[in-house]
Image (cartoon, grey):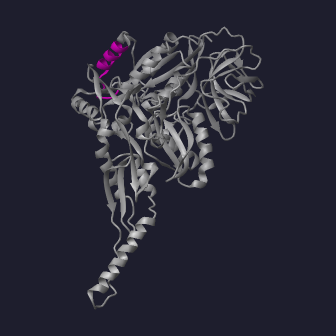
Amino acid sequence: MKNIRNISIIAHIDHGKSTLADRLIENYGILNSRDMQEQMLDSMDLERERGITIKAQTVSLVYKDNNKEYTVNIIDTPGHVDFSYEVSRSLSACEGVLLVVDATQGIEAQSIAHTSLAINLGLNIIPIVNKIDLPSANIEAVKNDISDFLQIDSADIIEVSAKTGLGVNNIMPAVIDRIPPPGLSQDNYAKACIVDSWFDNYLGVVVLVKIVSGSLKPKQKIKILSNKKEFIIDKVGIFTPKITYLDKLNAGDVGFMIASIKNLNAAPVGDTIVDYKAEQPLALPGFEQIQPRVFSGFYPIDSKNYQDSKKALDKLSLNDNSFTYESENSLSLGHGFRCGFLGLLHMEIIRERLLREYNLDFLMTIPSVTYKIETKNNKLLEIKSPKDLPEQTQIKNFLEPIAEIKIITPSDYLGSIIELCINKRGKQKNLQYRTNSVEIIFEIPLSEIIYDFFDKLKSLTKGYASYDYTIIDYQESNMIRLDIHVNKKKVDALSQIMHKDDSYRKARQLIDNLKNLIPRQMFEISIQACIGSKVLASTSVRGYRKDVTAKLYGGDATRKMKLIEKQKEGKRKMKKIGNVDIPKEAFYEFMMPKK
């Protein structure tokens, strides 16, 4: 175990994590140049297209120094705020991290968040300044910021260009020197921690494990500690990054295990695997359980795909523990699922994966957050969907989640950001100037930042600002449920919870938007935005007018009036019994408010 090092790469999005991993694989992996490609550890097409890491990936590399051979297990982690859960899982399996910072942009919000997580876990940190070859690189200023942040000497910071390979050779000696080997366990039986798991159509559930004590090998019988289920191991191995099967995995190794696990819930992420003969085994401390923050209804476009959709969501929830789902019904959309996500990008990625990997397309309802309701009979309810909200007369207090958001931006854009945050009902808590940027902290209701906050922030700052947020508390707030009525019938899929101060403006915006999406009928269609029985705003879609007097060729005017009155009566009858089908495009449009 003295010759094993387990490290993770953390950084803000687009600071060069995957590119640095590519250079390390080139130098110390077993792939030849023909097998190499950009973003080796980004296995999904979606990751390559968007240039982001979604799933944490692992690779085992071999480094030789002074006739000693070291095994270095690297875990490449996502950088976007929505995938912080993947990072927490990866760091739990490591003893140290490489902190990559872009020399042109400096320390960003997500870098600070992930580094703080690593410090809390007691991991050793090796800071790396990347992209030093770019003309706009401000190396000294960035190094000063890092040394102030980590309280270290700037001489300990490694300068590299992951793209050209400059300075990359200095990383491995620092890893061997500064990061300790895995700690020895006092247990005398095989014990491993489940870092990740995913479903393979041919192999069943593949489990990524870190061996804490003993060893895992084929034909060995093991037990999953939480559910007491037993399996016999078929194969074990590592990624180099190609799948490489081994005779066994020893203590300190990070590798995978296949054991003909068919049940999707049999090997939960964060669980402990032990030898089935182990007496009174103790579970390893699990990963931080992050609860979904954003909820949306997913309804199959073709109702015949309901069972296939359920299986696909099952597999994705196994692969991504921060994604949850449960069945629900809607009068407007039929059978579907209430899905929980960490943020809007997470939601978009899940929907895209369902389309690409399972060929399933869904309609999505307006995203909402989890509210808490204190009823007049002193019950505390968690509300994930507007339709779960009790009547206003039963509500004593309405509590909404408050997020602390940390924004790092060039000082030129400070005024615009403060204005944006105040418009989103934010309260400023702190303001700190760095070498070439400003860090500002606000407390903002979570419901205000899950829609268009990130897009507005990027457009106001020309893409230079970064942010990270955490939910800190629930606060009492004046919230209401806004219902949309089409032709006097409530469309439950279009209901949403919002702050009362914004209700008039948003009500008018929503019904004007819907008016343009509903096709005209032979009768007038009324559209109303209501709070309970109170109508806040209303509009209508005019009906087609058929000229019933065209066939007349003269005579008394009463003949004309008689036909028009008959037509009016017919339209009144149609309005009473006519059904209005809202097209699917309307629900897509309603998912996000107009900016």
Pick the front one: 21 or 481? 481
Please name the predominant secondary structure of the magenta segment in the image.
helix
- Residue 321, picture quadrant: top right
Where are the magenta residues, as a range?
133-149
- Residue 420, picture quadrant: top left
**281 up-or-down from 447: above or below:** above
Asked if the magenta segment contains residue 147, the reply would be yes
**52 up-or-down from 509: above or below:** above
**502 up-or-down from 571: above or below:** above
Q: Can residue 53 be spotted in the picture?
A: no
Q: How many marks?
A: 0
Q: Can residue 474 be spotted in the picture?
A: yes
Pick the front one: 71 or 122? 122
Q: Residue at x 32, y 39 (%)?
A: 500
* Position in image of residue 537 (x %, y %): 31, 51
- Residue 210, picture quadrant: top right
> Which quadrant does the N terminus fall into?
top right
Q: Is residue 170 left or right of residue 449?
A: right
* Position in image of residue 196 (x %, y %): 59, 28
Q: Is residue 416 left or right of residue 548?
A: left
> Which quadrant does the C terminus fall into?
top left
* Position in image of residue 437 (x %, y %): 27, 24
